Amino acid sequence: MTHQAAAAEDTGSHSSLSRFIKSNIREYGMLLSLIVIMVFFQIMTNGTLFKPLNLTNLILQNSYIVIMALGMLLVIVAGHIDLSVGSVVGFVGAVAAVMMVQFHIHFIPTTIVCLILGGAIGAGQGYFIAYFKIPSFIVTLAGMLVFKGLALYILHGQSVGPFPKEFQLLSSGFLPNFLPGTFNSTSLLIGVAVTVLVIFFNFKDRQNQQKHSTAEEPFPFFIGRNILIAAGFIMFSYLLSSYKGLPNVLIVMFALIAAYAFITSSTTIGRRIYALGGNEKAARLSGIRTERLTFYTFMNMGVLAGLAGLIFAARLNTATPKAGLGFELDVIAAVFIGGASASGGVGKVIGAVIGAFIMGVMNNGMSILGIGIDLQQVIKGLVLLAAVCIDVYYKKKS
Amino acid sequence: MDTILAMPILEMRGITKTFPGVNALDNVNLTVREGEIHAVVGENGAGKSTLMKVLSGVYPHGSYSGEIHYKGEERRFRDISDSEKLGIIIIHQELALVPLLSIAENIFLGNEPARNGVINWAESFARTKALLQKVGLKESPSALITNLGVGKQQLVEIAKALSKEVKLLILDEPTASLNESDSDALLNLLMEFRRQGISSILISHKLNEILKVADSVTILRDGATVDTLDCHKEEVNEDRIIRNMVGRELTDRYPKRDPKIGDPIFEVKNWHVFDAIHADKEKIKGVDFHVRKGEVVGIAGLMGAGRTELAMSIFGRAYGQNISGEVRMHGKPVDVSTIQKAMHNGIAYVTEDRKNYGLVLIDDIKHNVTLANLKGVSSNAVIDDGRELAVASKYRKDLNIRCSSVFQQTVNLSGGNQQKVVLSKWLFTEPEILILDEPTRGIDVGAKYEIYTIINALADSGKGVIVISSEMPELLGISDRIYVMNEGRFVAEMPAKEASQEKIMRAIMKSWED
């Protein structure tokens, strides 16, 4: 039945199918690469990768990278770059530590102040970039030094910790189980519910496309993609549930991913950011306030870097002057592996998230295999180069 | 004069060059004799610059058909360095100097007197000094280009040409941005070169200058050679050249329209604009004009007259600084100080440079069409895909945009269809005044006709349309009224019925003489 429907749908137009594959090979390719990398490490590590404990760790380790990749995607789509995020992570974490540990301020006001601080840092840098037209590379390079220095300064070169229990929950907490049994069935149920929701929206989207007869994705592809998503999600939540359940940070991360995917694909501000990066002059002459938009993009990045700083500090349970060192590289690499263009205007949230997980799985897998940090960096660098080369290759071909 | 007996140094025979959809040059012949100043004239878009690019190797052998004979041999230039080696040097309208390097560094750029990669500065400065003396420029070889005026920069370019032992110097509109005395100095220099046996090709709109120095004149029109006149054998005057330049008949290349013109809806008063970079340079020097309901108003002028600057400065100060003057809509002054405010007051500006200023080329038709009015397809800042698609499809149909679907990237569209996408974008903002800057530049005849039809429909629906165009027949064909602009001023105004290309050209020439 589905087969017939599919056949009727693409009415034997072989060219439209091949065109579809050509224009979407990047996205399918990305997902496929992630799966291949996962399977590879799953085999190489004799199944350690997908052990519930390791999977949980993998998420905790990557959450802050993924969260920052969301902001970085917007920055890069707008045609800019932000090198300061690693230092901002360290600085905000340090401020949080000083506030909570040395001044005994409650964690809620501390969190709010830290997010505002992150936003202010982003806004400050965005101001120079948007209104003074100083290249973002330079402004954020300066920011990188400034905030690294400030973190050292307020910590006096020492580590500050530990944090109050409630604050640590941000990173080490799990969704409590409201149902009987050691298995976290609540988490599994939520996982299933989210899966159903995602599939439901996919179908609704497709229905909408069909109404306007713009559905390009062949039906078998659509079904296959959804089955894959459902299987992945459910397996994922099952594995997590069999350990401690869904980590709090995963829920935050998931909500942010959903929000940013929606903003970039369906709102006017998202559309304007793509236009800004695609052709700033044309965007400006179309009545888009390009300066203000650039400013907001950096402010948003600052807030997310602040959040990442809190999560990272909570995870280590201490603020160190070295926190966040080199994070900007992982974040930027994730966005580029995810298919964003360095010249702006191109890139997707889901790509950046997959990119971050490719980096994360490689980090995790190689660590389990006992590959030294030296070789890890070499391999990660080569993967980044390869991903961008593939991009350029396909762009030339089409 | 013995130039009559001189041998040709250059013969270009049957040069044909096509771009996708446009025949830029069609069987063009050009013969330049040794030691003469040969003027090439024609309207904007007649093919002068393309011809020079073929000659200098910018368009390499094989990308055009026809033959180039230079110094008695057929030449097949692969790039500029091939032609430069033989002494053919082109000086473009936009000077190709590096602003923050010195005169000496610029003159020997890429050709430095050096040994094993180490530059001999003493030699380069000494040679520069000698060259500057030849062109009559009293500046130190170490002066930076950015500190020189345009006239002096022009002389540096010529000195650079001399350093390469020029035999045939090509100057593209060399006096366009020069004042009277700089222009005279330059023309005298050309005559001095003639005495030394250097041939020149001079491209210029200023016919009085051409009559002063040229030995012969080749006239191009629509990419074809119309005539070559020998100034020593026959009586050559401005009238004769102008008639040849514009001589085509107006047939029904323009759709008929029965204008219903109402009251003025748009007025600009005493508009002054200063250059975006050089605050002391006045670009628009007090312009007054108006547009009536249902009227198509043309603005004629040569390149550099300030038409684009005028339009962009009105459109939310997108160009210039220290802007003063008043804009009125329906008799009431309106604020056009930002692009958003100008759009809000019903003004739309369709750029002359659709690739750089009009389209997001990597994006699809749909997104480009709605970009200037996302509010029109969204509610609470969330875009309604269905509504957006409907809008894009409507304009695709109405404007006959030829594409595989509205999801096609605009980079893959032809010039005419790209222009229709830009037009759609601005039509969707529902403006009252539409300023079209060179709306048919670089698009083929068929698409031009369609654009004219759209312009007529807009005027008929009660909007005011301003068309800026360098193609005079086009302005005469579609406008109801024409303003002539030159050097930042409106120098004439005429109803299109009474206007002619000769009249427009004379108005421009006259303003130079005043």
Image: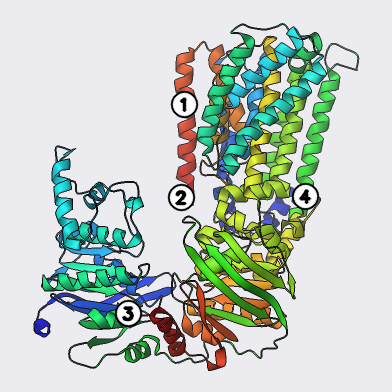
Amino acid type, label 4 = Ala
Which chain is home to disc 2? A
Instruction: Name the residue carrying label 2.
Output: A397
Instruction: Name the residue carrying label 4.
Output: B381
The numbered mark at residue A74 is none
Q: Position of residue A393 (x, y in %)?
A: 45, 44
**Distance CA(mark 4)–CA(mark 2):** 36 Å
Image quarter in which the C terminus of chain B is found: bottom left
**Distance CA(mark 4)–CA(mark 1):** 39 Å
Q: Position of residue B63 (x, y in %)?
A: 30, 66
Residue positioned 72% across, 59% down in the render: B388
Q: Position of residue A10 (x, y in %)?
A: 66, 56
In this rendering, position of residue B372 left or right of residue A387: right
Q: Earlier in the sequence, mark 1 or mark 2?
A: 1
Q: Secondary structure at mark 2?
A: helix
Q: Nearer the viewer, mark 3 or mark 1?
A: 3
Instruction: Name the residue carrying label 1.
Output: A381
Are dots 4 and 2 on a single chain?
no
Q: Secondary structure at mark 3?
A: strand
In this rendering, position of residue A282 left or right of residue A98: left
Q: Nearer the viewer, mark 2 or mark 3?
A: 3
**Distance CA(mark 1)–CA(mark 2):** 25 Å
Taking depth in this image into account, of A105 and B45 the one nearest to the observer is: A105
Q: Nearer the viewer, mark 4 or mark 2?
A: 4
